[in-house]
Amino acid sequence: MHIFANPARFVRLADKIMPWAVVVFIGTLGYGLYLAFFDSPIDYQQGESVRIMYVHVPAAWMSMFTYMVIAVSSFVALVWRHPLAQIAGKAAAPIGAAFTALALVTGALWGKPMWGTYWVWDGRLTSVLILFFLYLGYMAIWQAMDDEEKAGRAAAILALVGSVNIPIIKFSVDWWNTLHQPASVMRLDGSTIDGSMLWPLFMMAIAFQAYFVIVFFWRMKLEIDRRKIAVLRLQEVSGS
Amino acid sequence: MNASFAIMISVIMRDVRLGWSQGGTGTMSLSFFFIAVTLFPFGVGPEPQVLTRIAPGVIWVVALLACLLSLDRLYQADYEDGSLDDLALSPAGLLPVVIAKILAHWISTSLPLVLLSPLLGLLMNLPAEGYVQLVLSLAIGTLALSFIGSIGAALTVAMRRGGVLLSLLVLPLYIPSLIFGVTGIDAAIMGLDVLPHTALLSAITLVAVVLGPIASASAIRLALE
Amino acid sequence: MAIDQPMIELVLDSLACQRGGRPVFEGLSVRVKAGHLLYLKGANGCGKSTLLRILGGLLAPSSGTVSYDGTVLQQHDIPFSAYALYLGHQNALKPIWTLRQNCDALCRIMTGRDAPVERLLETAEHFDLSRLLDQPVRYFSSGQKHRAALMRFGLIDRPVWLMDEPTVGLDSKNRDALAGLMEKKLASGGIILAATHDPVAAAGTDFDVSAFAPASDNSGPFSSAFLEDWA
Amino acid sequence: MNEIVNTGDYSGYIALSYGIVTVVLLAVAVFSKLGQQKARKEAEALKALRKSRVEDF
């Protein structure tokens, strides 16, 4: 098995990385928020509401990134039956679903001032909505089977099938969107982002990434301990 | 090699007969298809222009749901009486058997829908230009629905109430087929070129034909453990 | 296709298996020569059915190998399904079909052709079911359904038979019929593994599966990985 | 581009967005941390139980 196969070694490694992740998180979040609110120009079209972009875009990025984490760990889990990879998907999924939901909510809150409606069938927002259903399906399958290890492998199969279909869904939704493009809908991220807006966006993106690392490690430790409990209870019951 | 081909043919015939015999899902999906489509005029009103506008979308969505309806019995019926073990132990191997079962599901459930969809086109006041593309897009599209739906059916075969989960797993993956199916019919109605839409629909079906059996076979192996 | 070479054997080498996170058995090794019958004994839950499903290729062992006639069989390999004929607890019969249709369907799945007619009649006669050949299985009693399921051993030629509780629901007359079929199979050089509590008349050696219960702290690769730091 | 709206007061929307983001991310973090600690305690308890039982032999 790989060096990472041993959960105990993983936990020790996670504990070593944790303080750094917290420092990065606080630093980038603080600086990012400062830049977002005090040091970046308001967009000549969208006015103040562009500040919502600084949470909306990172959340959308993280929703895609987390699904990629799930897809990769599912592949490793299915091919090498790697114990840690099997639970990495389960640990990451709720965080990814939260990011996806936030991307949708902030997208709607950003759309209201600009287009007067909360929900616009914009190509990207629609793809994020479908991604949210993929997350729900993934998390639902974990709870659907009584044997946790089999549920993990079923979820891994679903995640891989989902990841193959994401580009297809993305392409077909964009195609569908251009066909039904009402003339006045503005592209969600406005015209080209000018330089000074990139910095807060970049900072917030790193802050979200650091947040993911912190909570992912907590959830991994949670899942590892839950497996330990399951094994100990099994041994208790089988009288060994 | 011809032995496993003969086995595939016999599995297809077996499932089609089962699908249309007593307790099968063939008649259920077809009657659902008819009844569900006829509900829409009651909902949106009988004005022909309104019905024409939504006809392709309504027929496609209801065909998609009818296909979904019969999917959870695709493997569960055999799993419950133990014949899924025999199917898995057929010398043809699990993959050809899964392909045969998916094709049998398509023949027994989706083919009748496709052939009778023009009738519903009349009900929904579909313009004359749209009928050929309606049947063509449904024929190609429902193939993808069966192949992708088989993955959900295989993943939920060992679960008691798998039907609800099956739709949650599979419906997001149906969206590309739905989009290209309906846009093709709209293009035909407007006299535009239908080739790009049909080509993309076929591409998605080909992806499903490759991905479906592989994922379904591994999901079934998981359930047989 | 009777197997006449005496040296054909089924070799199980240090098989270990784990189901639902629970280790079932480990280090299970045995050699079964052609023409021999092995009765799998052991307490409930010691893995008799699990072992049969592994030999049938339906379940992968966590370690160890199964080899037949010298070739090691990987799970879900085509050769795996061509060498063994497995009957589990369920009858695998479609209630709406008649017994003849069920037998034909099974033979088509396993050989691509219908059941040969004279063999179908002979096997039905053997299990006292010829009167019911054209009756839907829905009307059969559970004993008749079980005998109908056992008919597969008379219809399909496979070198190894894997039988899970074959004698359940059989009265003495039918149990002798089954024993006769099994003895004919052993005489022709076949191998039979049967998990059963009351041995059929046919001569066979007992094999206690519960003797291979796992050591207490070993709980399989998946779960032991989580106990490593302070097992 | 169509009509330009750049002077409007969106503080309500902005506050709501950042508020919801903070609340949701905080909730996920807190639940994960609490769950992890609970599981940690339970695992320790079972481990202690096992160790004490092993010492009795």
Image (tube, coloured by chain):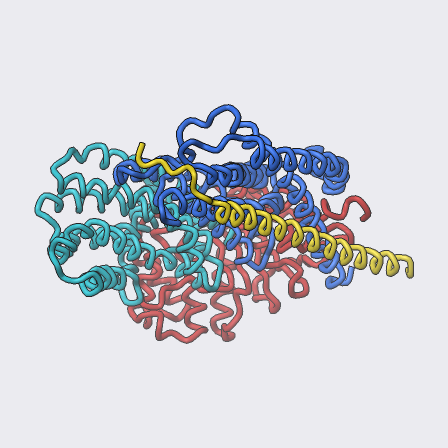
Chain colours: A blue, B cyan, C red, D yellow
Picture quadrant of residue B50: bottom left
Picture quadrant of residue B124: bottom left
Q: Is residue A213 above or below residue C220?
A: above
Task: List x then y, in percent, for residue A79.
Answer: 56, 37
Quarter of the image for the C terminus of chain A: give it.
bottom right
Q: Answer yes or no: is residue B198 visible.
A: yes
Q: Is residue C175 shown left or right of residue B121?
A: right
Extreme residue in the right direction: D56
Extreme residue in the left direction: B128
Q: Is residue C33 shown left or right of residue B21?
A: right
Extreme residue in the top direction: A195
Q: Residue at x 76, y 58 (%)?
A: D42
Q: Residue at x 40, y 39 (%)?
A: A124
Task: List x then y, in percent, for residue D22.
Answer: 59, 48
Task: List x then y, in percent, for residue A61.
Answer: 51, 36
Q: Is residue A4 above or below residue B25?
A: above
Q: Answer yes or no: is residue C2 visible.
A: no
Q: Residue at x 37, y 40 (%)?
A: A169
Picture quadrant of residue A27: top right
Task: List x then y, in percent, for residue B82.
Answer: 45, 60
Q: Is residue B71 shown left or right of residue A207?
A: left
Quarter of the image for the N terminus of chain A: give it.
top right
Pick the front one: D43 or C16: D43
Q: Is residue A56 above or below residue C186?
A: above
Q: Is residue A122 above or below residue C212?
A: above
Q: Residue at x 48, y 73 (%)?
A: C173
Pick the front one: B199 or B82: B199
